[in-house]
Image (cartoon, rainbow, N blue to C red):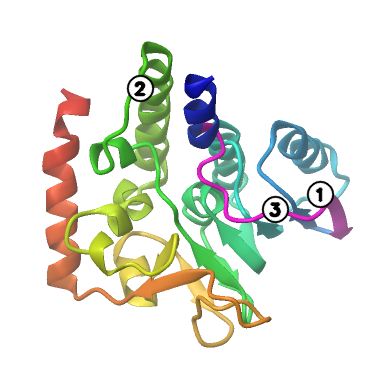
Amino acid sequence: MRFFLLLSVLLVGCKTTQQSVAEISEVSPGTIYFQGETSKQNVEKFEQLLVNSDQQINTLVINSQGGDVMVGLHLGGLVHEYQLDVVVHELCASSCANYVLTASPHVLVEEQAVIGWHGGSLQPLYVPMEQPPEVASYIAKWQAAERQFFDIINVEQAVTIIGMMPGITEKRDSAIYSYDAQTLKRLGLHIEFAGAQTGMSASGEKLAQVFELEESVLNHFLMLNDIVSAELIN
């Protein structure tokens, strides 16, 4: 039972809160709206619309708290393959941020929308956990797939876990973390904000803590992650 609980946490990528009923539809020529978790069912429906639409799809409007990480990787792969612009409506967190925001050539975060990360496949390097053989095997598969994904999209994989690293995790006051616009750019993302960047929802709930990192501080975290994760590559 303990194994299944742990694996469940890893599979869903530490979702934030309960998501409302899913809605995936082509809302206008060239645009698909995706509201819901990055579940197998939801992403399969999205892919069917993407591939079979009479119009060339060029924009994904998304509102997602995240979900299954391997399915999220597939969704991010589609965003990259089709070079979809992404518009964040309300929230894009966890595996949505990990694999959708990072894969897009242009992301627009709507006013009062929130983006944030909650860990990735490298998190066991910074938050040690008991790993039964089945869990260790799953994590190894996830790490290999995630590393390949970030190599392809040319974004720093560390974006997923900087908020969990020594020197910054002690300063956190929120489960979800994000970074200022300049840091996001240095990490390789292409994000613009329609309004002021925020970690607060429209209702005033704090969803994410936004860290502003000087370039030298960011470089320190990237170097540290390279050292810590080197054994996974060798």
Q: Nearer the viewer, mark 3 or mark 2?
A: 3
Location of the C terminus by quadrant is: top left
Query: Is 63 situated left or right of 160 in this image?
Result: right
Coordinates of residue 223 in the picture (x, y in percent): 12, 52
Task: Please give the name of the residue rendered at 80% of the width and 37% of the height, measured from the top-left corner.
Answer: 45
Q: How far separated are the C-alphas under marks 1 and 3?
A: 11 Å
Q: Amino acid at mark 2?
A: Ala
- Quadrant of the image occupied by residue 229: top left
Residue 137: which numbered mark, if any?
A: none
What is the secondary structure assignment of the residue under circle 2?
helix
Give the labeled residue for mark 1.
Answer: 22
Circle 2 residues within 10 Å: few <14, some 14–19, many ≥20 = some
Residue 69 lies, with reference to residue 145, above or below; the image says: below
Q: Earlier in the sequence, mark 3 or mark 2?
A: 3
From the viewer's perspective, tell me whether residue 25 is left or right of residue 190: right
Secondary structure category for the residue under label 1: loop
Image position, residue 1 (x, y; %): 54, 19
Q: What range is drawn magenta here?
A: 11-28
